[in-house]
Amino acid sequence: MVEDKKREAPHQGGAPAPRIYSPELQPLMQSLLATLANIDLEYEHEIKRVGRSSTGAGVKTYLMERLKERHRERRSPYVRELAALEQRIQHDRAA
């Protein structure tokens, strides 16, 4: 990732120029990121709901752990696919 920062040309105000991905890859990346954001939002909503409930502390702890595990399981395939996509992008840039 450090190498990417070296390749990015400064944009107005010294900020890096936005990355532009191939038309083939950009929709996939956006879809993966949107899916991960939705999963995270649902997780946060469920955690808050459990936290506000009148359920006992022991049950809340159990439910929070189950939600955390489920969150990790739901995210996992998308994170793997995003990592593979990022490797593909790196490979394409190096070629």
Image: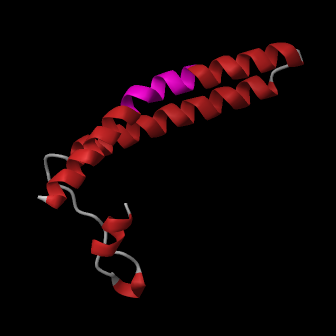
Residue 55 appears in the figure? no
Question: Quadrant of the image for the N terminus?
Answer: bottom left
Furthest toward the left, the residue is 95
Where residue 55 sits: x, y (%)?
84, 15
Q: Nearer the viewer, residue 5 or 20?
A: 5
| Residue at 65% in and 17% down | 66
Q: Nearer the viewer, residue 93 or 71?
A: 93
| Residue at 47% in and 23% down | 74
Residue 62 appears in the figure? yes
Residue range corresponding to the magenta coloring = 70-78
Occupied quadrant, residue 29:
top left
| Residue at 53% in and 26% down | 72
Q: How is the image coloured?
A: secondary structure
Occupied quadrant, residue 16:
bottom left
Where residue 26 sits: x, y (%)?
22, 49
- The secondary structure making up most of the magenta span is helix
Position of 18 relative to 82 (above/below): below
Q: Is residue 89 magenta?
A: no
Furthest toward the bottom, the residue is 13
| Residue at 79% in and 20% down | 61
Where residue 13 sits: x, y (%)?
41, 86
21 sits to left or right of 44? left
Q: Nearer the viewer, residue 68 or 39?
A: 68
Q: Is residue 77 magenta?
A: yes
